[in-house]
Amino acid sequence: MVSTTPATHAPAAADPGPLRPPWSARALIAAGLLVAAVAVTWLTFWWIGLSPASLAAGLDDTARLLRRMWPPDLPGAGDVAWMIAETLLIAVAGTGLAALVSVPLAFTAARDHRGPRWLRPAARVVVVLTRAVPTLAFAILFVRIFGLGPLAGALAVAVHSVGMIAKLLTDAVEEADPVPAEAARACGAGEVQVAVSTVLPRVFPALTGIVLYRLDINIRASAVLGVVGAGGIGVALQTALGSLNYHRAAGIICVIVVLVLLLELLSVAVRHRTVRHRRVRHSRAGRSAGDTTGTPALPAGRAPHDVGWDRGRVLRVAGAVATGVVFLVSLWSLNPDPGRLSGAWPNLRAVLTGMWPPAFSGDLLMAVLESLLMALGAAAAGAACGLVLALLTAVNTTPWRPLSAVVRVLLVVVRGIPDLVYALLFVAALGLGPFAGFLALWISSTALAAKFFADSLEQLDPLPHEALTSVGARRWQAFAAGIWPQFVPSFTGNGLFVADLALRESVVLGIAGAGGVGYLMQESIATLRYDTTAAIVIAIAVVVYAIETLARVARRHLL
Amino acid sequence: MIGDPVLRLSEVGKGFHGTTVLDGVSLDVPQGQFVALVGPSGAGKSTLLRLVNGMHLPDSGTVRTLGENPASCSRSRLRALRARVGFVFQQFGLVGRLSALENVLMGSLATLRLPRYGVMSYPRALRIRAVEHLDRVGLADRRFQRCDTLSGGQQQRVAVARTLLQSPELILADEPVASLDPAASVLVLETLKRISAEDGISVVCSLHQIELALATADRVVALRGGRLVLDEPAAGLTAERLREIYDTAGARDG
């Protein structure tokens, strides 16, 4: 027996030292988040009166509604084309306006801004406020000021986009190397010249990427702006639902879903191409950097001072001109004639003067709390369901490949339908109230969480799982030890992100009558109580900003 | 004005966050002279150069650059002064995504009113001059190449051409060859020296390498711990004497 004992075997008598690891702050935070998520979910269920019986009844009502919607009735091809065109033009005009405003705003908000000192905090406040208030909230306000139609929609899209574009661009400006700017300053250039000549060219690729990404988001947003009368295909949906023409409503929802799915395919293709393009260019740049004595880079037959029209320059100029033309057409399509704009002035004045002082009330705070509960409960429930779906779809965890493909397609379709459309449907099926809003958010949170989780599951290092399988671990053991520990940080981070998005959505779902503060907001504007509107906008901005900050802090300490 | 120094520092002192960086430095630079500024890291070479074009302002003493006092200039006068003083950076300060020609053209921004973007936004006459200056540094054929695809030595010569477009009366160079290989270093310094001799421009150039300083400069000025410890014509100096200064500095500071 003695000879089989391994040489490293420790003597049994010695004190092994502590065998339980000490508590870490990370573990405590993680445990706290888990407890909070469970508690909030229970509170939400109690608040909206969710029980197995009510859920079953709700699903029954929804199924009856869906049967009444079948078969979908598509509007004529010309109508569909016009509605889609208007939706796209709203998004393009809004995104373009936002980009134009964001560039100076981002330069002002950046850390190395050299202008008057009070400008920088002012710019940051604008960025935070416009980002925190959702597009639809702005849309309700602007419809009141500018009247029904795409002008209000495009402005709403623009104002909300300014916050995101300017914030991301500020980060890019702050990351840029400061030496070229210092060099231009040493040449005697003014601050605007320094920014345009040395910083703008370096952040230009980042700016293009951000604006395209935002355009993608804005097309989705424009599809539902019509629900509050701000133009686009949503107007037709609202009309159909309002006149109880459910067949037509189903047809329009189908058009929206196809539009969003096509957009999804397009953006995947574009992203794929730019990534490949960048790789090719990098390898080329690497070669020519090493080649310093090779052939001169100047094409023959060019005058010394002439830039020449080579292929790259022609493409760049053509692209810039085409972008400008599309943007101008989109602006023109909003029909911003001077008479209409000047007619908006009295409305604007009335709204702005009526907003002061903001009128906070108990009802308002309860409505904000309801929005918050709906969002957090739906996000927690959605994260749990999303995790299950993600484990079914991710290639490294799925039990059966064909199932993975089916779930994947299903998730893309579910994500293609805007939250507000779910909310409209559930309100039509179940009546007004937070129950409809919760169900809408739950579905969208589940689909979103499933996509995020599946993506990050597939990016995990496969080696630990293989190693465990090779030493004989069972399927569940290999998952628990080889995959789950790696996955916890991205699970938490993505879960918090889903909660953040759900909150932004929940404050506007009330516009469809699905509970929360959005309903009060629309009502306050309809009854000209702008002081209440101001209080609601402030409350929304504070809550959204607070949740976003909390999520950021939690992510930083956990990841 | 003839015979007046282009640069005069009188008893200049400067500190950052309580640490003294320069302490009572006086220095006159006449027109057309190539001055090498040597000394160990942290001796105050960069700070001295930045005091000259008003990127830093002195705590005590006075700086007179081309007859102006940067400390008492208004914003616009300071910009006008900077336009007359070229500055070459160790890290080149080029915008990598733009062509060599556009980077050179940036040297003319002080003479233009509006911001500029793209080579074609600059006047034709400036473009012709910019190409001439690129030719002087031997890079006219690279004018449309992106700067981030040029070698380090080529990038620094583009930066020198950008400085030349300012038609400077004084060029300040802050460790212009510290990130270059020996052959490129010699080429960049020879370019600077040739321009200084041909156009009669004064150059104040901080350097690490003693041999390069002795081979290029008319005059060597050494700083140590913020004080001026040597100021002699390069002709009478030997590498051994200069190295002694570095060594005793190391011994005393250590």
Image: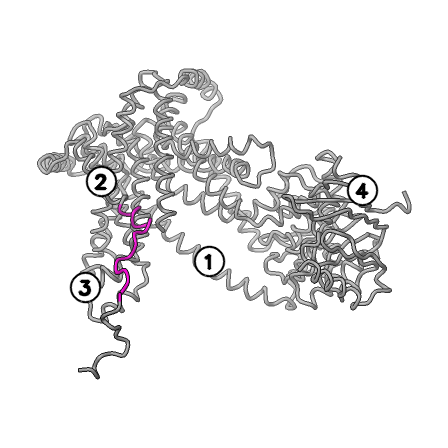
Camera-near label (3 vs 2) is: 3
Report which residue position mark 4 lands on: B64
Disc 4 and disc 2 on one polypeptide chain: no
Q: Is residue B215 left or right of residue A266?
A: right
Magenta span of residues: A15-31
Chain identity of mark 2: A
- Measured from the top left, where is residue B134 in percent x and y? 72, 56
- Measured from the top left, where is residue A231 in percent x and y? 35, 30
Tag 4's secondary structure? strand
Q: Which mark is residue A277?
A: 1
Q: Which mark is residue B177?
A: none
Disc 1 and disc 4 on one polypeptide chain: no
Circle 2 residues within 10 Å: few <14, some 14–19, many ≥20: many
Q: Is residue A68 visible?
A: no
Task: Give the Cα separation between the discs numbered 4 and 3.
Answer: 79 Å
Circle 3 residues within 10 Å: few <14, some 14–19, many ≥20: few
- Is B96 part of what is drawn in magenta? no
Residue A289, quarter of the rendered image: bottom right
Camera-near label (4 vs 2) is: 4
Report which residue position mark 2 lands on: A442
Chain identity of mark 4: B
Q: Which mark is residue A475?
A: 3
Q: Mark 3 or mark 2: which comes first in sequence?
A: 2
- Measured from the top left, where is residue A90 in percent x and y? 40, 34
Q: Is residue A322 visible?
A: yes
Q: Amino acid at mark 3?
A: Arg
Camera-near label (1 vs 4) is: 4
Q: Are marks 1 and 3 in contact (CB under 8 Å)?
A: no
Tag 2's secondary structure? helix
Q: Amino acid at mark 4?
A: Arg
- Measured from the top left, where is residue A325 in percent x and y? 49, 39
